[in-house]
């Protein structure tokens, strides 16, 4: 990737984040931009209940590419998040 491509990608990500009112819509847009330069099949965002608890809640999950056909059977990173 050349420097000019990197800058335009960063600008596209910044625009996607600032132009969307809903954070989920913004993440959908960011995923599309990032996937054009970085290959991944799914993305999951976990929030921890608190620092002392191992309980996590998934607040965002999207399957793209090969992940779409795997759906719920795909590895979503629960082991890493816990």
Image: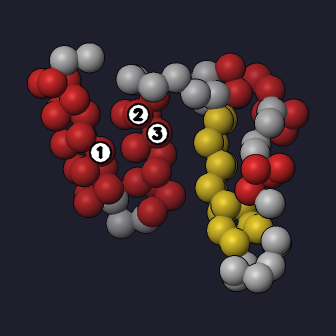
The part of the image, by quadrant, that contains residue 74 is top right
State the quadrant of the N terminus.
Answer: top left
Residue 68, numbered label: none
| Mark before the other along the chain sequence, 1 or 3 | 1
Q: Pointer 3: residues within 10 angstroms few (<14), some, or many (20+)? A: some
The disc placed on residue 13 is: 1
| Residue 40 occupies quadrant | top right
Task: Give the residue at x 65% y 68%.
Answer: 47
In this rendering, position of residue 4 left or right of residue 16: left
State how far apart marks 2 and 1 are (Cα).
8 Å
Q: Which mark is residue 34?
A: 2
Any mark on residue 31, and which?
Answer: 3
Q: Look at the numbered disc 3 and give the secondary structure of its residue.
A: helix
Q: Is residue 15 above or below residue 34?
A: below
Q: CA distance from mark 1 to mark 3?
A: 9 Å
> Considering the image in quadrants, where does the C terminus appear?
bottom right
> Gap between marks 2 and 3, in whole Å?
5 Å
Query: Considering only vertical position in the picture, is 56 above or below 67?
Result: below
Q: Position of residue 41 (x, y in %)?
A: 63, 28
Residue 81 lies, in percent from the top left, at: 74, 56
Q: Are marks 2 and 1 in contact (CB under 8 Å)?
A: yes
Q: Secondary structure at mark 2?
A: helix
Q: Residue at x 65, y 49 (%)?
A: 44
């Amino acid at each position: 990737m050349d420097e000019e491509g990197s800058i335009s990608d960063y600008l596209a990500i910044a625009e996607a984040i600032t132009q969307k009112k809903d954070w989920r819509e913004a993440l959908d847009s960011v995923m599309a931009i990032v996937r054009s330069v970085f290959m991944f099949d799914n993305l999951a965002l976990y929030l921890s209940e608190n620092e002392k608890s191992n309980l996590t809640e998934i607040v965002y999950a999207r399957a793209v590419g090969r992940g779409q056909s795997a759906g719920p059977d795909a590895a979503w990173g629960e082991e890493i998040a816990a």
